[in-house]
Image (cartoon, rainbow, N blue to C red):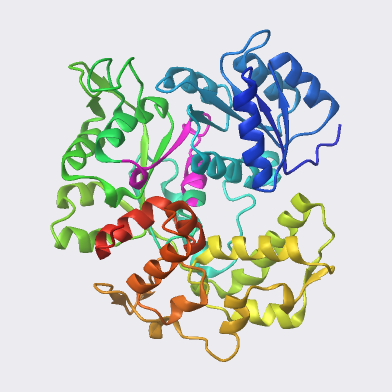
């Protein structure tokens, strides 16, 4: 059976309210979504129709999530599976990921986490499944700056060294972390676990990383395994590592040095075998100099340092990236769009892309959806792109820097967070964030989406700039 349903999702849960609300959210984001009440019904749906992704509950009558996962891995290996588990019940998630699940979600499901997980699952290129020995399958990287990154990844893949990924937001740090994991023959068949450290307060982050025992704090009604335990044998990506408090930095340092940790509220010491990849869009060296990050931890993380180039530093990758993103979105939207007109391409190649690949993906997805022609034209591009093309392009070194930003002459300008708005090139950072928050009626999720940054990054920016509501 040909499976071409790249944007179709099947939600499986025996609770009609849960599966209904999840489908409603998915459809609101532009995905095609269907529902099933248990694993047996889901198997029949999959037999009759192709799906790109199945989101399934763990506990269900007739056939549970594990049985459904095993059925899909055996008969439909190109379908990604995300397993939903009860809050704090990470043990079942460990089993699911080792059995081939793409990821897991803890109930109650958070919309932001669901949207990000679905986007990641559906963005996996089919080529990465057909050629598993190539860790960079489906990754565009013809520019010499990216070839240098690929060479470093191949060199470190078979080691257990900690890797530090630095680069602006939207440069693809998660993609490179996944490539490191796939290139490691000892770990690629184990779990790849990602933790967005900036999205959680310190108390919850510690529990998320290391787990906790029942009664260790208010709300801890049962034992919980942490993400390090889930990632045992595999790889853990600690995104926004700069969000770690001083106390958590000490505990992470011990994990790196001795591979030992304790769950919150527990006296038993646990041992873990995991490759640690840390990622940040800030300069950790500067944070060390400011006394905000431990120097000894920095050197432990910085064993292998990979700086990801901004999109403006990858001129040879612009054209293939644009075509690749258009092709993918055209397939998902079931539209016949084969490319870009010369005039539109000239604008796209000149634009500085302050939001990097993430901004490019969002903008081209919009263009594909709105286009009524077989080629993306200037009229399909948003105003912030075409407006910038009206003679107001700025070289990266001339873009206004927020207070405290630095410019490294060897690595280009340190830009503000990606914003995807024309005003970003002329408004101070604080003024811009206040403007967008006001327009979004102080809905932080909506404001972060419009700014093209993660909600946790917006919270950090507001705190740094003294913005309060």
**What's the residue at 36%, 21% (across, down)?**
225
The correct choice, above or below, for 58 with respect to 106 in the image is above
Percent across and percent down for residue 29 are 64, 47
Give the residue at x 54% y 60%: 358
The correct choice, above or below, for 454 with respect to 60 in the image is: below
**Camera sees residue 280:** no
Image quadrant containing the N terminus: top right
88 drawn magenta: no
Q: Nearer the viewer, residue 306 or 335?
A: 335
Q: Is 363 on the left or on the right of 446, as rendered?
A: right
Answer with the quarter of the image where residue 399 lies.
bottom left
Considering every residue shown, the one lying at the far top of the view is 62
Q: Is residue 193 magenta?
A: yes
User: Taking 240 as reference, is 65 left or right?
Assistant: right
Residue 72 position within the rendered picture, expressed as x and y whole percent measured from the top left: 70, 23
How many discs mark residues in the rendered view?
0
Residue 153 lies, in percent from the top left, at: 46, 51
In this rendered view, identify the residue nearer to me: 95 or 449. Answer: 449
Residue at 52 percent across and 86 percent down: it is: 393
Using the image, determine if residue 391 lies above or below residue 210. Answer: below
Residue at the farthest left position: 291
Q: Position of residue 388 (x, y in %)?
A: 56, 83
The correct choice, above or below, for 272 with respect to 296 in the image is above
Q: Which residues are magenta?
A: 176-200
Residue drawn at point x = 28 percent, y = 49 percent: 243
- Residue 29 falls left or right of residue 420: right
Q: Is residue 378 left or right of residue 139?
A: right
Q: Quarter of the image containing the C terminus?
A: bottom left
Residue 211 at least partly seen: yes
């Amino acid at each position: 059976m040909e499976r071409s349903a790249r944007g179709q999702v099947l939600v499986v849960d025996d609770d009609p309210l849960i599966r209904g609300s999840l489908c409603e959210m998915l459809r609101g984001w532009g995905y095609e979504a269907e529902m099933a009440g248990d694993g047996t019904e889901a198997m029949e749906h999959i037999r009759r129709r192709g799906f790109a992704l199945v989101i399934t509950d763990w506990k269900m009558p007739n056939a549970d999530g594990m049985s459904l996962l095993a059925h899909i891995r055996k008969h439909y290996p190109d379908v990604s599976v995300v397993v939903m588990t009860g809050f704090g019940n990470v043990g079942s998630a460990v089993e699911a990921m080792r059995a081939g699940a793409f990821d897991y979600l803890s109930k109650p499901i958070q919309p932001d986490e669901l949207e990000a997980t679905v986007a990641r699952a559906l963005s996996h290129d089919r080529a990465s499944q057909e050629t598993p020995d190539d860790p960079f399958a489906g990754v565009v990287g013809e520019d010499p700056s990216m070839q240098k990154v690929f060479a470093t990844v191949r060199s470190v893949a078979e080691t257990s060294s900690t890797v530090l990924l630095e680069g602006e937001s939207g440069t693809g740090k998660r993609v490179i972390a996944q490539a490191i994991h796939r290139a490691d023959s000892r770990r690629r068949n184990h779990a790849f676990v990602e933790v967005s450290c900036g999205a959680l307060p310190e108390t919850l982050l510690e529990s998320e990383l290391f787990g906790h025992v029942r009664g260790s704090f208010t709300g801890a009604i049962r034992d919980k395994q942490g993400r390090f335990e889930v990632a045992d044998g595999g790889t853990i990506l600690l995104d926004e590592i700069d969000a770690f408090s001083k106390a958590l930095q000490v505990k992470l340092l011990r994990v790196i040095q001795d591979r030992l940790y304790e769950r919150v509220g527990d006296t038993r010491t646990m041992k873990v075998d995991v490759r640690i990849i840390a990622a940040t869009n800030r300069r950790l060296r500067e944070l060390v100099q400011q006394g905000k990050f431990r120097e000894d931890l920095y050197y432990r993380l910085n064993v292998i340092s990979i700086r990801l180039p901004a999109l403006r530093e990858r001129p040879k990758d612009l054209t293939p990236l644009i075509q690749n993103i258009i092709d993918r979105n055209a397939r998902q939207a079931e539209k016949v769009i084969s490319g870009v007109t010369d005039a539109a391409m000239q604008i796209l190649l000149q634009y500085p892309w302050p939001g990097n690949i993430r901004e490019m993906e969002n903008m081209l997805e919009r263009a594909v959806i709105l286009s009524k022609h077989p080629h993306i034209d200037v009229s399909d591009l948003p105003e912030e792109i075409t407006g910038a093309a009206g003679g107001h392009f700025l070289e990266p070194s001339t873009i206004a820097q927020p207070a405290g930003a630095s410019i490294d002459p060897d690595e280009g300008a340190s830009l503000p967070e990606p914003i995807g708005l024309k005003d970003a090139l002329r408004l101070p950072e604080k003024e811009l964030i206040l403007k967008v928050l006001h327009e979004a009626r102080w809905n932080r999720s909506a404001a972060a989406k419009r700014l093209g940054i993660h909600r946790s990054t917006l919270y950090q920016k507001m705190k740094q700039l003294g913005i309060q509501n």
